[in-house]
Amino acid sequence: MRAQWVLPFFKRLLVKGMADDATHDPVTTEQALDEDQPVRLEPGLPPEIASPLAPFNGVEPPSPPWFRAALADAPERSLVPVQGANIELLTWGTRGKPGLIFVHGNSAHADWWSFIAPFFAQHYRVASVSLSGMGASDWREVYTFETFASEIHEAAKAAGLYDAPVKPVYIGHSFGGSQVFYSAARHKERMSACIMVDTGFGGPPTRQQMEEWEKQERKEGGRRSRWRGPSESARPNRVYPTLVEALARFRFMPPQVPGNLYIADFIARRSLKRAPMVDGSGEGWTWRFDPFLWGKLDRSGMTDVSARGAVPLAHIYGDRSAIIKRHAAGAMGLIPAGAPQIIIPDSEHHIMVDQPLALVAALRALLATWPA
């Protein structure tokens, strides 16, 4: 991997968000890291993208037996203190077995992996972590890549992932992929390998790239929204009076129709927490993530990052991923030559929502055969 590409990668990495209040003009939580503010979408998203859970009116969608069985294998939940903040940790399996730690994307949380992780618990000690500012973890006044790396490492230690004779494998989706990549570059001694799941490389697309992409989407009959650039400011998360109303506001970023609505519903419910209504009328529901995280993100420690000599890397991504499509031209050169790259068919950016069992199969295949 060329060291000179690493700094632009982190400065211009496009990351994904997961939920937003559509009345916020409409501010989303997706953001390019070379901008300090979220990006906005054109209004008028079709309802199956803008409010995919609204038709259920708060009722959980039907789910298949495999999903219910995975959730029945409930994790142990704990909080790990890291640099003054409590970090949410979920664990499965027996200590002493080889370790895996899963890291979520932008504005997401550890439970994005709680229907994936049980598939590995028989042969691995598995952990999933909520980075600070997200999930049930504490918020910070300042966030850094190095702090996130420490949170992942301390969570891995608390989970017993270093009790095994081999070091754990770090696995991260989207923004979480950038965090495990950073750890691989800065702290390769902490892991045996690094797997990124649909992690975008490069900054926001140019106008010409977007016009060409939208033209191709129209030819294919697809419907996509357009980026409007950075918003003027972040705003506090709205408090909704009812769970039904909050669930109706949930949507994915980049915008897409969820492949499996029962997974979207599960993720959405665990993205919310109780909070007092602004008008003092009682308690409502609001999103768990810190809406000001990106304005608090200190990038000063990134100037001398190099991935030269990093651990083995692999990448799994969706064949219809908006993140990958936008950055396909030259951006994927950050993956070392010869590194495994697995494309999941019929999947957009959120592979664990669109094709969860295919993702499990891809991860199992990688872990069984790689790194040699």
Image (cartoon, rainbow, N blue to C red):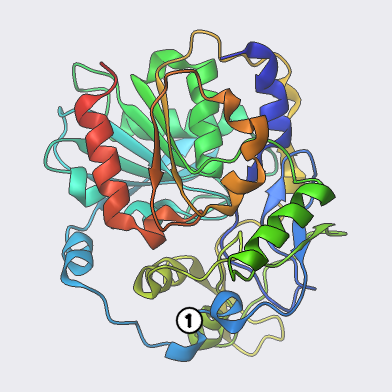
In the rendered view, does 211 fall on the left or right side of 115?
right
Answer with the quarter of the image where residue 341 lies: top left
Q: Which residue is mark 1?
A: 53
Q: Position of residue 368 (x, y in %)?
A: 19, 29
Q: Quadrant of the N terminus?
A: top right
Percent position (x, y) of residue 296? 74, 43
Image location of residue 203, percent across then percent down: 73, 39
Q: Position of residue 227 (x, y in %)?
A: 77, 60
Q: Is residue 277 visible?
A: yes
Task: Between residue 65 and residue 217, name the one nearer to us.
Answer: 217
Disc 1 marks which amino acid? Leu
SS at mark 1? loop
The furthest residue to the front:
219
| 281 is higher (above) or lower (below) than 146 | below
As drawn, 114 above or below 202: below
Count numbered badges in the picture: 1
In this picture, residue 36 sits left or right of residue 122: right
Circle 1 Cα neighbour tier, 10 Å, few/some/many (<14 / 14–19 / ≥20): many
Please report the residue visible at 20 percent of the width from the left and 60 percent of the height from the top: 70
> Does any portion of residue 160 appear in the rendered image?
no
Q: Nearer the viewer, residue 25 or 91?
A: 25
Q: Is residue 86 shown above or below 339? A: below
